[in-house]
């Protein structure tokens, strides 16, 4: 095997050193990070684990998100180790590793959901935080089950999506990508004082969709709200609502406008820009983030890796939040975002 030089700081084994090895070659782990088994072979554990879920048996329109995690990894080769927006070096502050893909049954959605829950529990048994790359949105349900089990209480949820995903059934099926958050409320794994959708838009089946959603406890910041109120006000509202509760963040990449993320299965016009989404995520610094996913990337509909790049950057900023929190760097972080005013 050829020797792979890595950037290693503070004893944390980091990404392939792209000053010495072309970043466009070699195995596409997320951000060219080491695999979890390589980190384990060096006698270390990982604080943050990136895991893929190649699953799309829950979709109601275009398919193909089973290839999403691979595409996000392939589109993550250009990520660099320092995040100036938050003054974070996520891969140096803590150990981050790519745990590979979960072996989910493509023919049995119930088995797949069980497997995701169990694998998420196994991967977090040592206290690690999980950054999951989907896969369709069905997988948020078992991921939330595992997150609330680990937290020992129902978790707060920030759900970035064009869609509510609180519908009841499709063709009689309860477990689909349009229903995970209704199931999660029914199962009592969400803290319904602190759950919000962000970025919703587009036509619904009826007014009842919104009435049901409100009854479950969801707050809504629509895509238009983000445009009209601006990022800072939205961040303030979300922080107030959630406080220091254990927080799970689920990002359906279709929250972005199709201009920013064409590679997805149920696109809706009028979405957020990738800049707005990244800025909102950065504004959540210091919150008690216990897990996150980025889902619904469908590479066959992508162009020029637009969607893959957006998703890989969203995951990078989520990992930065986790790394800061775990490294104890995030205290009093509210309002400390770099604005570039020195330029
Ligand atoms: N993309 C997600 N997760 N859900 C969309 C469901 C839209 C529908 O079938 O009406
Ligand atoms: Zn969606
Ligand atoms: Zn969704």
Image: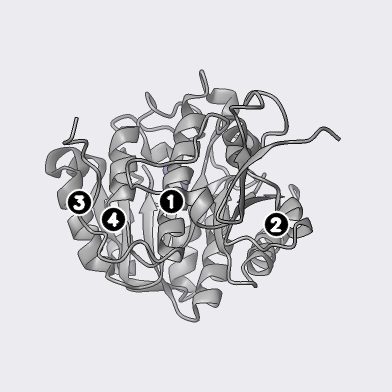
Residue for point 79% across, 57% down = 41
Marks 2 and 3 in Cβ contact (< 8 Å): no
Q: Which of marks 3 and 1 precedes in the sequence?
A: 3
Q: Which mark is residue 302?
A: none
* Residue that mark 1 sits on: 320
Q: Is residue 226 above or below residue 149?
A: above
- Residue at mark 2: C-beta within 8 A of ligand 1: no
Q: Position of residue 341 (x, y in %)?
A: 16, 36
Q: Helix, strand, or loop for circle 2?
A: helix
Note whether residue 103 is visible.
Answer: no
Give the residue at mark 4: 210
Between marks 2 and 4, how big is the CA–CA gap?
Answer: 29 Å
Q: Are circles 1 and 3 on residues that touch, CB within 8 Å?
A: no
Packing grade of label 2 (10 A; few <14, some 14-19, many >=20) is many
Q: CA distance from mark 2 to mark 1?
A: 29 Å
Residue 112's disc number: 2
Spatial separation of the CA atoms under disc 3 and disc 4: 20 Å
Which quarter of the figure has residue 192? bottom left
The residue at which mark 3 appears reads as 234
Residue closest to the eye, 145 or 50: 50
Q: Is residue 155 left or right of residue 225?
A: right
Residue at (37%, 23%) from the top-left corner? 259
Which element type, helix, strand or loop, lies under badge 4? helix
């Amino acid at each position: 095997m050829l020797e792979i030089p890595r950037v290693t700081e503070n004893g944390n084994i980091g990404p392939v050193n792209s000053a010495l090895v072309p970043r466009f070659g070699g195995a596409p782990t997320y951000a060219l990070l080491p695999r979890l088994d390589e980190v384990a072979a060096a006698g270390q554990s990982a604080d943050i684990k990136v895991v893929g879920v190649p699953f799309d048996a829950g979709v109601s329109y275009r398919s193909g998100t089973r290839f999403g995690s691979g595409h996000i990894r392939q589109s993550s080769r250009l990520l660099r180790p320092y995040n100036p927006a938050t003054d974070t070096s996520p891969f140096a502050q803590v150990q981050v590793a790519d745990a590979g893909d979960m072996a989910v049954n493509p023919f049995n959605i119930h088995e797949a959901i069980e497997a995701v829950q169990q694998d998420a529990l196994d991967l977090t048994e040592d206290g690690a935080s999980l950054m999951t790359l989907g896969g369709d949105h069905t997988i948020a349900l078992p991921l939330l089950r595992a997150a609330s089990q680990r937290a020992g209480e129902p978790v707060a949820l920030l759900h970035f999506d064009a869609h509510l995903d609180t519908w009841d059934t499709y063709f009689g099926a309860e477990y689909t990508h349009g229903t995970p958050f209704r199931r999660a409320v029914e199962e009592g794994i969400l803290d319904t004082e602190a759950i919000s959708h962000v970025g919703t838009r587009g036509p619904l089946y009826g007014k009842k969709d919104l009435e049901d959603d409100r009854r479950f406890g969801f707050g809504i910041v629509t895509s238009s709200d983000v445009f009209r109120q601006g990022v800072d006000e939205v961040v303030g509202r979300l922080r107030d609502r959630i406080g220091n509760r254990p927080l799970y963040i689920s990002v359906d990449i279709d929250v972005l406008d199709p201009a920013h993320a064409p590679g997805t299965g149920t696109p809706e016009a009028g979405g957020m820009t990738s800049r707005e989404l990244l800025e909102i995520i950065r504004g959540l610094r210091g919150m008690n983030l216990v897990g996150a996913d980025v889902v619904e990337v469908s590479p066959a509909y992508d162009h020029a890796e637009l969607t893959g790049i957006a998703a890989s950057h969203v995951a990078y900023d989520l990992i930065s939040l986790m790394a800061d929190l775990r490294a104890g760097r995030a205290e009093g972080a509210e309002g400390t975002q770099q604005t570039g005013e020195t330029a």
